[in-house]
Image (spheres, coloured by chain):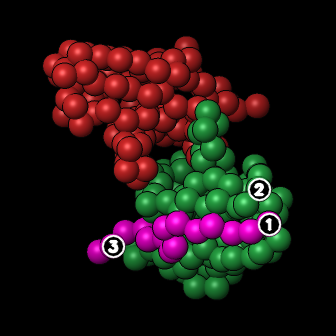
Chain colours: A red, B green
Amino acid sequence: AQTVTQSQPEMSVQEAETVTLSCTYDTSESNYYLFWYKQPPSRQMILVIRQEAYKQQNATENRFSVNFQKAAKSFSLKISDSQLGDTAMYFCAWPNDYKLSFGAGTTVTVRA
Amino acid sequence: NAGVTQTPKFRVLKTGQSMTLLCAQDMNHEYMYWYRQDPGMGLRLIHYSVGEGTTAKGEVPDGYNVSRLKKQNFLLGLESAAPSQTSVYFCASSYSRLRGATDTQYFGPGTRLTVL
């Protein structure tokens, strides 16, 4: 079975600090992408970052970066210099054939 | 460029009623998907389509039907609504596979459905 798991249901971080969300997955695929999506209270699902598995370099998008450990099947998201607008639920997602499998999500609350 | 749109945004049904959710995308994407989101369970795939005129079952297809008569539209139908179908429904679309792997999915704003 190919699964994505997020072991942290909730996390809280002070504004301007750093928080890291973990994600582990299981796949036998050799070429794939991994995604982090953000869902703020507005409910809209927004792509945060995408990692290409065949690239060794970790993806970075402004304050968001990933730590991709292919051998360990680990894909964590680091949010640096947290802002109040980062308060949201974050989902790790793994493409499974033509589909996306989602973790249960991690709720991140940024405190002022 | 509106991206992915869904109608309606909210709906309340009585048990046994039927309804259709409409998803439209203007990005010329080949693939389209319907998910449901329930607390603590992430998003689960209901049905998907890899091209006009094609549909396939996802993880939780029971009680739902879909149609993709036009490339830009993907309809989700509930023939006889049940309280267990109370959920938030998301439509998504993507280009076909990139370098042999599934590409980024773009989501609509969601539809909150309550079945009494």
Q: Check disc 1 and give the amino acid type.
A: Thr
- Marks 1, 3: nearer the viewer: 1
- Precedes in sequence: disc 2 or disc 3: 3
Please give the range of residues in magenta.
B1-15
- Compared to A84, does B90 lie above or below? below
Element type at mark 1: loop
Chain designation of label 1:
B
Rendered position, B68 above or below A109: below
According to the image, label 1 marks what residue?
A: B15
Q: Name the residue that disc number 3 marks.
A: B2
Gap in Å between the C-alphas at discs 1 and 3? 33 Å
SS state under label 2:
helix
Task: Return the x and y of residue A30 as percentages of the image width and height.
Answer: 59, 34
Mark seen at residue B83: 2
Left/right placement of residue B17 relative to residue A26 reads right
Q: Amino acid at mark 3?
A: Ala
Quadrant showing the C terminus of chain B: bottom right
Read off the chain for label 3.
B
Q: Looking at the rendering, in which quadrant would you find the N terminus of chain B?
A: bottom left
The answer to the question of whether label 2 and label 1 lie on touching residues, with beta carbons closer than 8 A, is: yes
Q: Which label sits on residue B87?
A: none
Residue density around tag 3, few if under 14, some if 14–19, many if 20 or more, within 10 Å: few
Per the model, the C-alpha gap separating discs 2 and 3 is 32 Å
What residue do we see at 66% from left, 77% from top? Answer: B20
